[in-house]
Amino acid sequence: MSGASVLYDVPGRKAKARNRVYTVLGSLALLGLLAFAFLRLNSRGQLEPEVWNIFNNAGVRTGIRDGVLTTLQVFAVAAVLSLALGALLAVARLSVHKPVSWLATSFIELFRAVPLLITIYAVWVTLLANRDSLGLGGSGPQFWALVIGLTVYNGAVQAEVLRAGINAVPTGQREAAYALGMSKTQVMVTVLIPQAVRAMLPTIISQLVVTLKDTSLGYIITFEELLFTARQMSTNIIVNGNDTYVPVIIVTGSIYVGMCLALSSLANWIERRGRRTRTGIAVASAGEPVAAADAMEVAEAVPGGPAAKQD
């Protein structure tokens, strides 16, 4: 009996025929829904060439470009800050000092539990109320509210990712580093964190994709990122007496998909490259647990191990 048949009963002739019928019916239902949506959009004039011609307008293209640049700006700042905060929280949670560990754990669990939208809105209200004393003007409160909200939430998630990577490093490497007289800080910075980052890099980048998508929440606090800009355009641009929600949503959604696919492709490339390496701990696929390397790989990775003795 094959291993696959233990977990999955091979369908018989009746089950196969039934599955084919369900597949055909499901496909027809999906095609019917698509045809219905197409006809409805066409009857409302959303598929007319004049509606889609708005993207030939220089002002529309400039608005979309500015929205994309603003979105990427928020993402870049929030990504860097969340990674730095995540590393700090991961180290603090693993600290042998109980108050430090408890404080980091409380911070992580709090901001992982609170919805991100509430965090962004609360920070925005706080910054807006103290805008003059903080020296913030223009879109400053919206920008920093979005950045801070994304930072604390994604930093808490990245902290757990890094903590899992650090715990996955073989214990022998830590013990060998201590045997060489390295301090706890040196072991963490030079031995544990580099291998944890390498092992969890695909997962880290996958979380950065979530950070990029969550920048659209700036729309709630009237921050002029891509989604807010798209809504403003679709509301203000009227063609043949109709709004332009459908074409703007399709184009904006395609831009978001393109940016997220670019980051996902980077994660997949790093995962494939990491699988070809032979030392340290294995690279985990995005969203999967980390597996420790075998004993020979660990021995080769430890300073002063067999590989070093051959030199």
Image (cartoon, rainbow, N blue to C red):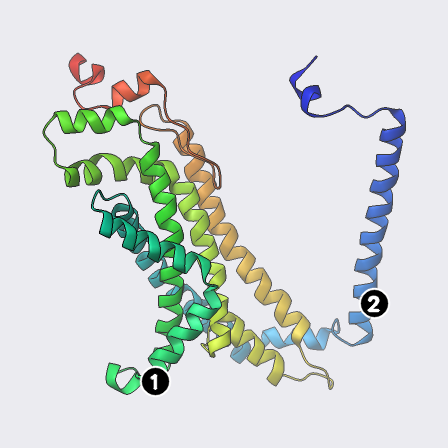
For mark 1, what is the residue? Answer: 129
**Location of residue 254 in the rendering, given as x and y in whole percent from the top left corner:** 59, 60
Sequence-wise, the earlier of marks 2 and 1 is 2
Does residue 311 appear in the picture of this structure? Answer: no
Which amino acid is tagged 2? Leu
In this rendering, the answer to whether 170 lies above or below 289 is above
Residue at the left extreme of this rendering: 181
Question: Closer to us: mark 2 or mark 1?
Answer: 1
Foreground residue, 296 or 187? 187
Residue at 38% in and 46% down = 160
Label for residue 40? Answer: none
| Residue 30 appears left or right of 307 | right
| Residue 174 appears left or right of 257 | left
Label 2, label 1: how many angstroms apart (C-alpha)?
49 Å
For mark 2, what is the residue? Answer: 39
Residue at 33% in and 63% down = 77
Residue at 23% in and 52% down = 99
**Location of residue 291 in the rendering, given as x and y in whole percent from the top left corner:** 41, 29
Determine whether label 2 and label 1 are within 8 Å by CB: no
Residue at 77% in and 76% down = 45
Foreground residue, 251 or 100? 100
User: Which class describes the residues within 10 Å of circle 2: few (<14), some (14-19), or many (20+)?
Assistant: few
| Residue 56 appears left or right of 309 | right
Which amino acid is tagged 1? Ala
